[in-house]
Image (cartoon, rainbow, N blue to C red):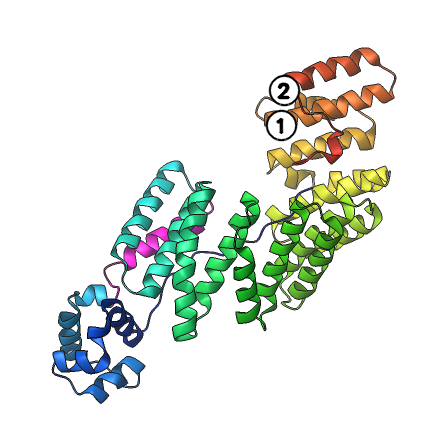
Amino acid sequence: MSTVEYTATATLAKIKLGRRISELMTEKGDAYSIRAFAEKIGMNRETFRQMLLGTRRIAPSELELISKGLNVSQERLKQEDTFQKEQELVTILTGKKRTKVMLIRAHELAMELVEIALGVTEKGYSLNNLGRVQFVQERYKEAHQTWLAAYEYAKSVEKDFDDKQLLHLVTSNLMLTCTIRREYSNIEEMLNLVEKVFSDDPSKLGMAYYTRMIMNEDRGELEQAKKLAYRSLELFEQTNDNKQVGRALINVAHYEYILGNYKTSARLLGSAINLVKPFEGILIIAVKEYVKSLLQLRDYHSALKVLNEYDPLAQEYPEYWGRLQIMKTVAKDDPSFAESVVNNTNLSVNLRYFACKSLMEFYYLKDDGDNAIRYYEKSRMLTGTKSEFLNEEGF
């Protein structure tokens, strides 16, 4: 059983014009203080200061003076020159279908936006979106390094402008790459910052506890990981977001399951299924885990009922369908379902290996040594891993 991960979606950088001007001035150094720059462009210092604060409208003629003083075009200053590229990039990143060609295009767009970015906010968002592309391409190490660079800008944006949105996006993504890569260097500083800045935000705190949960599991500290999973669940329950709460229930059930508390795991997963029915990608995970718990409880009648109810959904997810077919062999005491998985070359080698292992156990329990050995040999052809199939990592 594997835990469900949380991600942060890509977001465009919407920067107010006064703040945008302030950021570009800061980037150019001390020579571009409010006093110095106002004198340079022949503008009253107090009038200019009110413009930066957003309390006075910037007239077109004044904007022209400012853009010339900053040596950037008005289109670049107002981010009008990048709007279409940003829209195209986010459309690809948030789309349901992403082909290889689309991802190549997304990477080109993201790189162009990083190269042209000015000011801490735009640079931070452009790096965040580049990291998103790299993540989708499964280039996790590169994505992590890109998000680390974005993190530095995000901290500045939060400190200087009390704007937490970029920090939320980047830290959420960094927590994800840390848990995927199982590499936690310097993560404590980031988690402490998240817990401080977002102390009144249960959703963001829930993500921080989720990360600590994974860290403890990787260290083999399962009881502590379970405690953190329950704390994460408590926080997500405060959001009234069924999708988030359902995910958290699946995570808690994961630890109850691996600690042998199958009855509790089944109860939690039953609750999760009721919450995530509108979210099919999460629902199929909850169903698979629920059936596993029922099989461990030897409740084959309930397991078959669930398997039959969600068979149409499973058809949309071939790898999960294969896992449920293997479990149907156990529930119905019928090898034909697992055999259909073994013989389906469209399914992954790993899944077909699980099916072989289940059949080897099936025939062993039937005292059918010939068939047990036959499937043992098939499993050896697929992989040399040895373990009970239900408890194998990744099943």
Q: Which residue is mark 1?
A: 350
Specify the quadrant of the image occupied by residue 118. bottom left
Residue 245 horizontal side relative to residue 106, left or right = right
- Would you say the magenta stretch is mainly helix, strand or loop? helix
Residue furthest top in the image: 370
Q: How many C-alpha atoms fall within 10 Å of the one at disc 1: few (<14), some, or many (≥20)?
A: some
Q: Residue at x 38, y 42 (%)?
A: 103
Residue 322 is at least partly visible in this image: yes
The answer to whether residue 128 is seen in the rendering is no
Q: Which mark is residue 382?
A: 2
**Looking at the picture, which amino acid does disc 2 mark?**
Leu
Q: Is residue 358 left or right of residue 101?
A: right
Task: Give the vertical position of 114 relative to 393 (above or below).
Answer: below
Location of the N terminus by quadrant is top right
Placement of the C terminus among the 4 image quadrants: top right
The image quarter in which residue 234 lies: bottom right
Kind of residue at disc 1: Asn
